[in-house]
Image (tube, coloured by chain):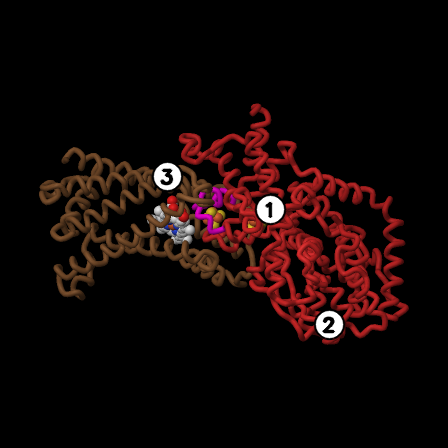
Chain colours: A red, B brown
Amino acid sequence: MEKVQLETLTGVIDKKMNRQLKQYIDICARCAICKDACHQYVGTGDFKYLPARRAELIRQIYKKYFDKAGRFVPALYEAREPDDNLLDELYDSTYACTGCRRCMYYCPFSIDTAWILSVAKAILIAAGRGNEMLGQLADAAIFKGDNAAMFEGVMLSGFDDISEEVRAITGNPEHKVHVNKEGADVLYVALAGAHSIRPAAVIFEEAGENWTISMFEAANYGFFYGDTEKARIITKRYIDEAKRLGVKEIVVPECGHAYRVAEFFYEAWSKEPMPFKVSHILEKVDDYIKSGRIKVDRGKIAGKVTYHDPCQLGRNGGKFEQPRDIVKAVTSNFVDLTPNRAEQWCCGGGGGIVAMEEFKDVRLKSGIKKVEQLKASGASVLACPCENCRLQIEELNDVHGLGLEIWQVIDLVVAAMPLPGSQRSVEAAPAGEGANA
Amino acid sequence: METYLWITSVWGVYLALAVFIVGIGLRIYQWATTPKSAVRLGMFPKPATKSGRFFKMLKDTFIAPHSAKIEPTMWLFSMIFHVAALAAFVGHLRILGEYPILPGLLGGEHAMNNFAAYAGSIAGTLMLVGVVFWIARRTFGPYKNLSVPEDYLLLALLFGVIIMGDHLRFVYGGFIHADTYQEWFKSLLAFKPMFPEKLLSGNVGWSLGTHMLFTDLLLMYFPFSKLVHTIGSFAANYVRSE
Ligand code: HEM
Ligand code: SF4
Ligand code: SF4
């Protein structure tokens, strides 16, 4: 490997190094307890997807250039330089990882393999091997933000159309999607696509919330790509908007990584404290239901309903109960998946993998655990508050003929609300429509 | 044999302890001086209070309940090994000095030696079982693929330490007790090394020397190996709940 490139790559490790990473690299016992935690390893049996193996590649580089013992006797640690072979395997195992952190949950030392792989992504990007699709999607989002004025007209007319639909559902001529409303309490940062806005608007309006819609999207391909600077810029857009409008709270939509980025990553990236609260929309909805601000009828949803915890919302975001409470409020026929909550299987669609065609095979194979869980539950309706999860499970649904109806949770809520036009929103495509991928 | 004992059980011990202490010190210094990750890496569920998180860390580290759920067999053998290793460690403290109350409770020195023989035999056997399981596990499939020479080296050293410890226990345990080893080990600590006559007569010296040879090597390699998980696991498991 050429000296210059080598220095670039080792420089990345140096820059990214922190205490946790160092400990993870130093202490892994290679006990492989993590192996059966990973849906990709379980689904494919392919060694490169064994979590500790993915991290091992970073360890090999680290041992070779940073660790005294590794430099002294490289053979003992299989320390090696980041040559093409290593980088090829690293690319596959890193961009395939959905960041679900199920491996971390079961590891005796709680080693965060996905976090180690964030260094891998930085190395790959520095080596010119970042995933092209994710990179393009990140750049497109940044371009769109830079040229917000150019897109404003289209967006405003889109919001007008959605306002029409909202009024048709609620029957209230006053209801609409609020735009650029200074002094609003809540800034709702949606995903691209009416499906992410319409039901939320119905709920906010019915609850009498003082809210406004963001001109930006919550999805963050900079995060999936592994470039924290891009990810920061994409997030900063709506953070600045929230500051400008003076809101008290940012509400992120039914999207796993958007919540994690806003609640757990942005402050670290931007090195500034956030002057407002971050909530997931289902926290708000749960609160509206429990406090009686919106009404839902049990019994309007037919069939046995189950719920999938998106990894970034559940295990990595801590929102286990609110979504379940909502689902249980709209149906008396609820069944949980086994295992659930912190032990929930990753569906296989996280980390941006649904946008990367090259990983389709491993993605579908890795869904086998989810398919088994869904079959065993006997449910006919699945509520799932994450776009990427829904896209994946929709596809598993087709491939395995599960015959499931897959819903956003807020669509279920609107369908269960005693509103004149709520049936409309039921008919509107429950998932995947206008996907941000 | 006396030369062998002097190399492995005097100078070797001094060297090994020095390397171990400096090495561990350096490792901790490196960890402590590397800045913490700015991103909170915790996962859920996590206790709301600091003390709750602290106790969860202890539980996660000592009991590893999640690992037990996903790989019960591995968990069981690892538990067997680690608990037995802890017991063996506690037993070895006898070479620093007799336990204060225990011999009295058991009914005298003879009974104490008998108890030590039983406890040591059990711990030594269980450690062997654990290590043999680990070695066997690394000979096939994904476990083999994941293993690097470091893993085998550690297991070989460990196997050596245990086999020779068990050898001392089962072959010489009937007539050489802690008091004899104590004389030798305390002389080391006083920097006036010597060997009691009992250790120089017969072949026990070869066994002790080999037990110490493996121990010296293991101790010296310890700070540069994944065995630093003994310390690091607490920190890493704490991060889980942060
Ligand atoms: C305190 C918390 C500790 C935890 C949670 C822990 C956990 C583990 C785990 C999961 C393994 C993997 C087994 C494998 O290699 O397949 C392991 C290996 C090992 N541990 Fe620990 N350990 C702890 C403390 C210790 C201590 C105090 C010692 C000191 C003797 C120790 C010595 C070893 C050894 C020698 C191995 C074998 C490594 C190998 O398989 O090559 N551990 N430990
Ligand atoms: S479970 Fe943890 S310690 Fe064991 S191999 Fe996996 S990452 Fe390493
Ligand atoms: S984070 Fe999830 S996908 Fe990635 S290695 Fe761990 S278990 Fe596998």
The residue under label 1 is A97
In the image, what residue type sits under mark 1? Cys
Can you give x and y, in whole percent of width and height, for residue A81 in the image?
52, 30
Answer whether residue B46 is magenta in the image: no
Which residue is at 37% across, 39% downward? B23
Q: Position of residue A331 (x, y in %)?
A: 69, 73
Under circle 2, the secondary element is loop
Q: Residue at x 45, y 53 (%)?
A: A108
Q: Earlier in the sequence, mark 1 or mark 2?
A: 1
Q: Is mark 1 within 8 Å of ligand 3?
A: yes
On the image, numbered disc 3 is attached to which residue? B23
Q: Quadrant of residue A336?
A: bottom right
Tell me if A52 is positioned left or right of B2 in this view: right
Q: Are marks 1 and 2 in contact (CB under 8 Å)?
A: no
For disc 3, the chain is B
Could you tell me which residue is drawn at 59 percent across and 52 percent down?
A100
Q: Is residue A275 visible?
A: no
Q: Which mark is residue A302?
A: 2
Residue extent of the magenta highlight: A21-34
- The residue closer to the viewer here, B117 or A268, is B117
- How far apart are the alpha carbons under marks 2 and 3? 65 Å
Callout 2 amino acid: Ala
A437 left or right of A338 in image: right
Judging from the image, what secondary structure is the residue with disc 1 in? loop
Rendered image quadrant of residue A3? top right
Q: Position of residue B64 (x, y in %)?
A: 44, 57
| Pair 1/2: label in front | 2
Other residues around mark 2 within 10 Å, as few (<14) / some (14–19) / many (≥20): few
Which residue type does callout 3 highlight? Gly
